[in-house]
Each structure stands twice: as C-alpha cells, then as structure tokens.
Image (spheres, rainbow, N blue to C red):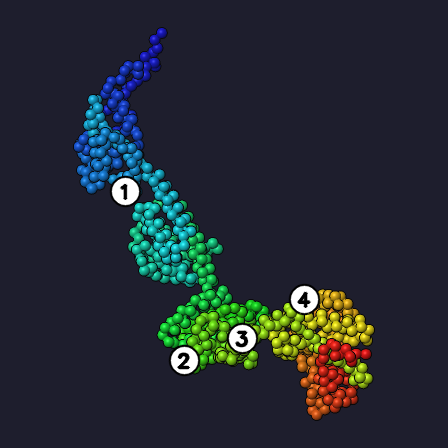
Amino acid sequence: MKSDSKTSKRHTASVDRGFPGRPADRLKPTKDIHDEPSLAERYLWLEAMINHVPDFIYAKDLEGRFLFANHAVVHNNGMASVNEIIGRTDAELHGSAAASAIDDVERRVMVSGQADLGLEERAMKAGWDKWLMMSRVPLRSADGTIIGVVGASRDITARKASEMLMAAQAELLRLVVDSAPLPQFIDRFALLLEGIAPGLQAAVFLARGRHEPMFSLHYPDYSDNKRIAIGDLSSTSDTFESIARETFGMRDKIRRLDIRSSDGELHGLLAVSIPGDSINPAIQDFLNGAAHMAGIAIDRIHSESRIRFLAEHDALTGLPSRIKLDEELKTILRHAGETGGSVAVSFIDVDNFKLVNDSLGHEAGDELLKEVAAGLSIHIGHHGLVSRIGGDEFVVVLNGDGVVSLEDRMDSLRKSIRRYYNIKGIELQVTSSMGIAIFPDHGTSTSELLAHADLAMYRAKLDGRDGSYTFNKELAEASSQKLLRIEDLRRALLQDEIILHYQPQKNLKTGALTGVEALVRWQHPKEGLIAPAQFVPLAEETGLILDLGLAVLVKACRQAKAWQDEGLVPVRMSVNMSTRQFQEPGLPKLVAAVLEETGLDPRWLEIEITESLIMKNVEAAVTRMGELTQLGLSLALDDFGTGYSSLSMLKRFPLTRLKIDRSFISEIPEDEDSMAIVSAVISLGQKLGLVVLAEGVETQAQADYLRQAGCEEVQGYLEGRPMPAAELRRTLP
C-alpha cells in the first residue's frame, strides 16, 4: 500500500549560490530522499558542512592563490564573501613579511608531497596572542598530481594561554624559592607578569620600612630603582592610579593588588595595567596568586637577611658579634701593618652590671646595654668599630697615629659612658672599666690584642673600677704565671698535695683546749709549703674551691674521728666554708655524706661562715643554716664586725659561736675605739647566748683584756700556731 505523498516523502535541498548566508537558508526541497543526489548537490552539502566548522579550512593553488576558504577564514580576514579572497595570496592580504613563513611551509608540502601536521604558530590576524594549530596536506588532482595545498587550522589560543600561565606559575615558584636579592627578585617578578598577557604593564611599590610611608619603585624600565613617595599607604584607588599612570605612562586601567606578609603587614603594592575594560578571569586569578606568592617570597628574603645579619651581629644591640669583629679586625690590622699605622683595641666592661640585672630585672639590664651600645656607636661614628661580645662586655677598635693619642681617645670614650641613664624610671649612674692593647706594641694578631686588652680590663677592675689600664709586659707575665698556677692547683687536688694544719682554740679562763680550726696548706713538690693566701683566692676565682673545700672537709672530719679512735678526748673541729660552697644546692647532703663516710658525730663538727657571706642573701642564708644545723653540727660566725649585719638579723641566725675579727684584736689594749668595739661584741654575744671567741690573740696583754671583758675563748699565736696533726696530737689530753 502506497503512503500519502504529502506525509511519506522526505526532501533533499538545493543550495542558493548567493554568498554570504547560512547554508541552511540556501537549501530547498528538491526531490525524494531515496533519489541519488547529484554531484552539484553533494558539493553544496560539503560546502555547507565546511562552512559550519569553526576551524579554518582553505585550499590554494601552486602559486599560493586561494581556491577556496570557509566562512571562518573569510570572516577572520575581515571579508564578507568568499569571492573576495579567491585568487588572492597571503602576501596580498597580510604583507610579504608576515606571509613568508606560511609560504615556506606550504611550498615545502607541495614540493615534497609530505603533509605538515600539528604546527603551532601565531595567527596573522587578531593580535599576537592568538594561536593556531596548522595542518597542511598536498592537494592532488584525480591522477594524483599535486596541484596545490589544503590547509586546516584550529584556534588553540585558550590552551596556549593556559600553558603560558602554568609555565609562568612554575617560574614564579622558582623565583620564590630562589635566593635572589630583593631588588633582583622584584625586577624578575615584574618582567614575569608582563609576559602573561599582551600589553600588560606591571610595577611594584616596595615599602622601605615596615612602618614607613615611603615606597621604592621597582619597574623593568627603571634600572636605577627610581623612588617616589606615596604619602598614605591607604591611598584611594584613584590616587594610586594617578600616581602609577603618571610614573609609568600606563595607558589602560590600573589595577592595584596588595602584597602582604604572612602576618598581614603590607610589604608593598602591585600595579598592573592591561588593555581593555575587562580582564581574563584566569589572568586575574594568576595575578592574585602572584601577589600572594610575592608576599611569601619577600617574607623569606627578609628572614634570610635577618638570619645572615644575626650570624654576624648581636641580636640585642645590633652591633657586630665576635665573629664579625674577628673578620673586620684582621682586615684593619693587615692595613695598619702595610701602612705602618697603629690600632687600639679596648675591652670595656660595664661596672656592677649584675647589680642592675639582679635588682631591676633582665629587661632593665637589656635596656641599659642597648643605651650603652648606642652611645658607643655615636661616639665612635665611622672612625672605628664597636662590637658586643657577650654579657656586659664590649670591644672598641680605633685607628690612630700613636699610643698616647689612642689611649686618650679610648679614655674619652670610657668617660662618655660615665653618665646617668634613665632605666625604668630610675636614674642610674653607670661607669665602666676599660683595658687597652695597642697594635703593634702589644700584639700583632687579633687573638693577642683581644686577650691582652681583656687582661688589662680585669686589672682596671682590680684597681677599683671606673678607670682604664693599658696592657704591659708585666701584666702578661703575671697572667702567664696565673695560668700555670691554676693548672698546678688542679694537679695538686688530683695528687692529694692539699694538707691541713690545725690551730688550737682554748678557754681563756681555764686554758683547756675547746677545739681546733682546720687551716689548709699546699705541700708543693718543688716550692714546699704554700700558704692559703697564695692559692685559695685563685681557687675561688676558677671554681676549684668546690673541690678544695670538699677535700678540706673530708680530711678534717677524718682527722677528728682518728683522734677519737685513739682514745683522746673529743674536740670540736672547725672548718671554714667559702661563699661558693655555701651557695651550692647540694651542700647539706654533701656534708651529711662526709659525716657518714668518716663516722664523725655531727656535734663535733663546726662550720665557720663569714658575715659578708650571709648578708648577700639573708633569707637564703637563714634557710641554708637551718638545713645544716638539722644535721646536728654547729655554726660559727667568722670575722664578725667586718660586715653589715644588724642586730635584728643576728637574732635570726642559728649560731653557736661568734668570732671577733683579728683586725679589732690587733689594736688592743692600745686603741680605745677597738677596745670599745670588742667589749660591745662580747656583751652582744653573751646577751644572745653565743660563745664569743677572739681571733688573732698574740700577746698576753690582749688576752688579759679579753678575759677582763668577759670573752670565753681565744685563738692565736699566743695559744699556739697552726701545726700538723702529729704535732698537735702531743698537746691533746
């Protein structure tokens, strides 16, 4: 059964040859779909499909003249009809310079018969940022003869832009992790941004200081890093745009992006100018990220710069450190050696700085050091070098023409420190001690001069502080001997060369032996017996006093127990305790361990401490004395009258014995003032329930006066000199 022709027939189309126009507009129903299309119809269908393809498709003859071009090619070349391009060459359309590269490729394809596929190149129209992927194949006749070339190209601008941004992002990351100096980084950063889009201009305004409104200008066209001032970092967009436009000659709209640090501080501003009223979102995102990455890079550069600075400078004062001092001083000395000049090196120590730290706190001490450092730097200016090498010690280096001139300049510098400083609202007068060493008289190397200046500074302190001392050979010899003596003492402790002599303590009324005081001696293998005054201060200075004090305590307790084991009447053994020993946290446990080891009953041990020792920290001293007396031993206050203890404090001390200093005893009975003091001390001791012992009793007249004044015990040459244990043994009951 035949269907109705009005409903069962499909239609083909005919093409209207008028151009332009959409092929669909030129297709008209012709005949039944089952009829075979004619060649003309097939051509029209093919032409219609090619014109609908967004890619650029064309054909040229052997002379490079267009035979065919689809709508994309026609419109891209600014034409309305294909007829306008037929028969013309690229050179006629775009000029010979632009067309030569295309002609070369197409001619190579036509001559070789080999296709050229996937070549990426910039378009000759629509700007430098338009990219095409080109493919060319030979155009052959029915018999295979090459009669031209067929080309097809696709717009790959979006892909190329994406690749370019990815490459720029990778380069930006390399910039961030690179160690380039800040100006170099900024210039490379700005150049990188200018490469991501046609016509883009970039400039960076960098803050010269975190809290300063002055900005430095970094821009690729300004190799001298021209500087401009922006009065207010919060300038409005219009103000900033005006500044950027005037400075750079930017033609298009200016976009401002903040470059911030990780903590939100403003490092600088990024100014970007790009043609057009709008910006590609991908490029805008890249610029936002670039500004953020720039902030990270600047943070890193600042951190590395700070690290490099701190490697060579003191963090508190900003002065060169010991490392930097050594480097620069070597250069200064080398130059002075070549020119025959003189160089003064001085060690400066702030007097009584520890007192400031202890009383006002370390923050106040730091503030004082910064002010002293600033004053030294101002006084020296560019004529020398100032360094802080630690604590409250500074080193100053000056060039000069003579020793006298350099010494005068150094002393003037020391006097500049001697002034009042307002620290935490308190006016402090600060002085300093200075040691001076001169090149080449006192040394030719950095280490020699620093060591000799240091020695001279300590001599200035010994002379009473607030003064200067210039190094000399005698000081060097004394220092050398001191060093040898320290090592000798260290060896003596290891080889048990420390011995004890014992001085009797007797009851003044009965003459009975009440105790002995252990007094240290050094039995040197070459020098013989060395008195304590020649090595105990050195032990205290070097810290060897702890080992020395322990050795004395052990030997004394062991000897007291040995006499008891021989059946002799027990006597009190008095042992002196140094300040350093007394302050040791583990002293009570140490004393208890010695008593246990030697087997001595604690009641026969008396520890002598000085008045000046306990006055350094009364509360701590009271606590420590309580810990010791809990062991069962007794305490004696030695050298009483030389310190500054008050009666109220004296009542708090758990003492058993009060020893009057020999300086008062030596002047009685001739000096009435000394007699009055001694009588008062004896009376005070009796009222406090303490046994009073007078030291340094050498004459019978002294003993008679003390007996009359009520003193109970005496110790001195009158009753017996310090003697070895074997000699004292013969006098024991």
Estimate the x, y position of residue 555 in percent, counting from the top left: 71, 71
Residue 671 vs residue 309: left or right? right
496 in relation to 705, above or below: above
Q: Amino acid at mark 3?
A: Ser
Name the residue tied to disc 1.
127
Looking at the image, is mark 1 or mark 2 earlier in the sequence? Answer: 1
Residue type at mark 4: give it: Pro
> Which residue bears the numbered disc 2?
402
What residue does disc 3 label? Answer: 480
- Residue at the spot 33% in from the left edge and 51% down from the top edge: 191
Q: Is residue 266 above or below residue 494?
A: above
Whole-number angstrom distance, CA of label 4 to CA of label 1: 84 Å
Q: Quadrant of residue 584?
A: bottom right
The vertical placement of 648 against 193, above or below, is: below
Cα separation between marks 4 and 3: 34 Å
Q: Position of residue 701 (x, y in %)?
A: 74, 90
Q: For mark 3, give the secondary structure.
A: helix
Residue in front for this viewpoint, 355 or 341: 341
Q: Residue at x 34, y 14 (%)?
A: 7
Residue 589 screen position, x and y as percent:
72, 65
Asked if residue 649 is positioned above or below residue 242 in the image, the reply reads below
Q: Nearer the viewer, mark 4 or mark 1?
A: 4
Q: Earlier in the sequence, mark 3 or mark 1?
A: 1
Q: Amino acid at mark 1?
A: Gly
Secondary structure, mark 4, is loop
Q: Position of residue 462 (x, y in %)?
A: 56, 79
Q: Residues within 10 Å of mark 2 (few under 14, many from 20)?
A: some
| Mark 4 / mark 1, whichever is N-terminal | 1
**Would you say 606 lies left or right of 246 here?**
right
Return the residue nearer the eye: 722 or 223. 722
The residue wearing badge 4 is 585
Q: Nearer the viewer, residue 176 or 65?
A: 176
